[in-house]
Amino acid sequence: MEEVIRATAAPTPRFGVNYVPSQGWWYSWLDWEPSAVAADLRAIAELGMDHIRIHCLWPVFQPNPGHISTSALDRLQELMDLADGCRLDVSVTVLNGWLSGFHFRPAWQHESVNMFVDPRAVSAQLDLLAAIAERIATHPRFLGFDIANEPNVLCQYPGNDITRDQGDAWTQRLLDHCATVAPGRMHVAGFDHAPWLTDSAPFSRDVLARTGNATPVHAWIEFTGALKRYGHPATATHHLGEYLLELAKAHQSEARRPVWLQEYGAAPQWIPAETIPDFTEAFTTAALTCDQLWGITWWASHDIDRSLTGFADLEYDLGLLTTANLPKPAGQRLADLIARLRDHPPVPAPRGTALLLDGTRAPDWAFAERFFSLIDQGTHPAIVRAGRRDDPGHLDDRGITKIIEM
């Protein structure tokens, strides 16, 4: 029963962080220090978090198609045990060829190897997921697999351009495989905003919203362009997560399928540092107005130590905790909010009014602006696709009684 609950939107959404180790970033898979990881996880739990999303560096775990690192698997298993000691559930993101602004494709995937369609490359990916599942599939803290971090970015790597049919087939195949090797867990695909806001990405919104066990969204005010377009503070930058969650729900075939705000955050390079706590609370509170919300997961747990050079400047200050495991103002603000919500669970906003998304347009900013304008008028809208507007069962399931055409 516990596994079923984890894959279902609960009355009180889960709260967590994308774990970034305070010592050595994810290079720590190589220079493993379990006492440092344990200290990090205790600090995360003390903020009131109940889960973490972690990232396997693909070249470390699978340096060769025929070789999976036993030491990396051992360290992953130890991390799971340390998380258990802190009562933190763990979503394990595996094929991380893109993370924090760096490509981490294994060396054996040179430009002539398309990771999405090359039979040997795909077979190796399936092998890696199976090997990890053999170690942790029954671990009490294993939430499930996230197949890759923002894999749509990897399509931009030379030699990796694909059609939408190929991208959808890859996503479906890997998620089906996860269900086979680790049944009963919450398996997802953590794409960024591009497939949701444009029609140019080689992955369809329908497949992202209907495969796996939940639909994650990544809602970055900078990378989506919302901050540049609308400024801060603004309805659009505070309610971007809400918009993407509702957009995901509009493409789901099951009204009760969970959605997950899997990544969001703010850097002092984007908005003044003193405003980040207010932003954190406002953005989180707006997302909590959505129903079927499985969880909210901030990026990131910790700042990156500036002795590690080469990261974009914004990457160093995205944590809720310092590298010394001290809460930053945004971390304390989010911890206070979580504590209040544990005692007084959020009540999702009624969404009887829905915006109609017709089949001839992407849900771009022109469409989003209508969504934000309704929020300014005091209405939290749903989104309904044109093909479902005359489906009374679908509308009733979602509580929609009024549809507004653009």
Image (cartoon, grey):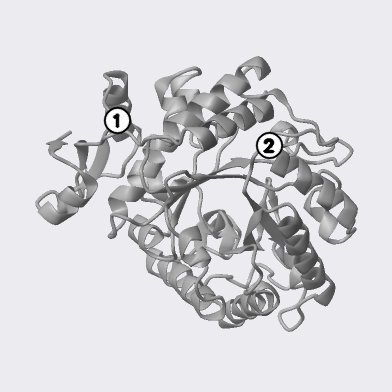
Spot occupied by residue 82 in the image (x, y as percentages of width and height): 78, 58
Q: Nearer the viewer, residue 340 or 349?
A: 340
* Quadrant of the rendering where the C terminus is positioned: top left
User: Which amino acid type is marked by label 2?
Assistant: Leu
Spot occupied by residue 243 in the image (x, y as percentages of width and height): 37, 37
User: Which amino acid type is marked by label 1?
Assistant: His
Spot occupied by residue 125 in the image (x, y as percentages of width and height): 62, 75
- Count the marks: how many? 2
Which numbered tag is attached to residue 9?
A: none
> Taking 165 as reference, is 176 left or right?
right
In whole angstroms, how far apart are the C-alphas of marks 2 and 1? 29 Å
**Residue 141 visible in the shown view:** yes
Instruction: Indicate which disc, 2 or 1, sits on the residue closer to the N terminus.
Output: 2
Numbered disc 1: secondary structure: loop
Query: Residue at 37% across / 35% down in the picture?
Result: 347
Camera-near label (2 vs 1) is: 2
